[in-house]
Amino acid sequence: MCRHLGWLGAPRAVSALMLDPPYGLLVQSYAPRRQKHGLVNADGWGVGFYPPDIGEGAPPCRWRSAAPLWADASFASVAPALRSECVVAAVRSASIGMPIEPTASAPFTDGSWLLSHNGLVDRAVLPLSAHAESTVDSALLAALIFDRGLDRLGETVTEVAARDPGARLNILAANRCEMVATTWGDTLSVLRTGDGVALASEPYDDDPRWEDLPDRHLVHTDGTAVQLTALKGPA
């Protein structure tokens, strides 16, 4: 399990999304408010972003760690200087038997997209892939999604759920132009502001504009409009 967030819109400091909010990922790493599975998220963290001053085709930058987010003073000192119009970040609670290592922490990437998985899936239903960054279920799932393409995200999620009916498959992925997500077994909320859209496992503040999204849906945004599509799958 984990908590994740994504931002698409006007450039914002990474610290303003992860560290500064009263209930941001920093607080969610030790005291999440809406987490259904697990109590803390101390088994690593990661953030990926696209700096405004790098070329459009350049891969995203990432910073990942196997340590708790609250223990990384170096990141806290640098995060205010990191700004991006597109950010994906997560804190991790490792499933039993899964390794705790930086490469196991989201976001994962194919060089274009950033992707986080909040949930759990039986690795036996996922194909092995040379592109997977780790042996954890989330990395294998990310590799499958990248191989099939983000335009087939809803289809991929429903097919994996059919193979593992107990899977929890909240996906959050973004590139410079769009952000997509699924709700399948856990919470996701959306915040539409005047300069962009945030998606998060749980609201990072008490802004009344936060909306809880329904389960088993595909979410798409270009940073302004938000579209929801129901996903069909096993009961």
Image (cartoon, grey):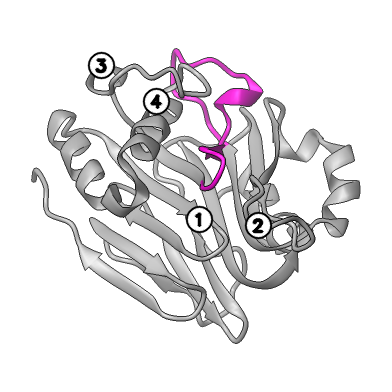
Q: Earlier in the sequence, mark 1 or mark 3?
A: 3
Q: Residues within 10 Å of mark 3 (few under 14, many from 20)?
A: few
Is 199 magenta? The answer is: no
Q: Are marks 2 and 1 in contact (CB under 8 Å)?
A: no
- Residue hosting label 4: 140
Q: Position of residue 78 (x, y in %)?
A: 88, 49
- Residue hosting label 1: 174
Q: Closer to the camera: disc 4 or disc 3?
A: 4
Q: Closer to the camera: disc 2 or disc 3?
A: 3
Q: Residues within 10 Å of mark 4 (few under 14, many from 20)?
A: many
Amino acid type, label 4: Leu
Q: CA distance from mark 2 to mark 1?
A: 19 Å
Q: Closer to the camera: disc 4 or disc 2?
A: 4
Would residue 42 appear left or right of 199 to someone viewing this image? right
**Which element carries disc 3, helix, strand or loop?**
helix
Residue with the most extreme bottom position: 194
- Residue hosting label 3: 124
**Which element carries disc 2, helix, strand or loop?**
loop
Q: CA distance from mark 1 to mark 3?
A: 27 Å
Residue drawn at the location 85% of the way across and 58% of the way down: 80
Q: In the displayed structure, would residue 32 be above or below residue 130?
A: below
Q: CA distance from mark 4 to mark 3?
A: 10 Å
Q: Quadrant of residue 62?
A: top right
Amino acid type, label 3: Ala
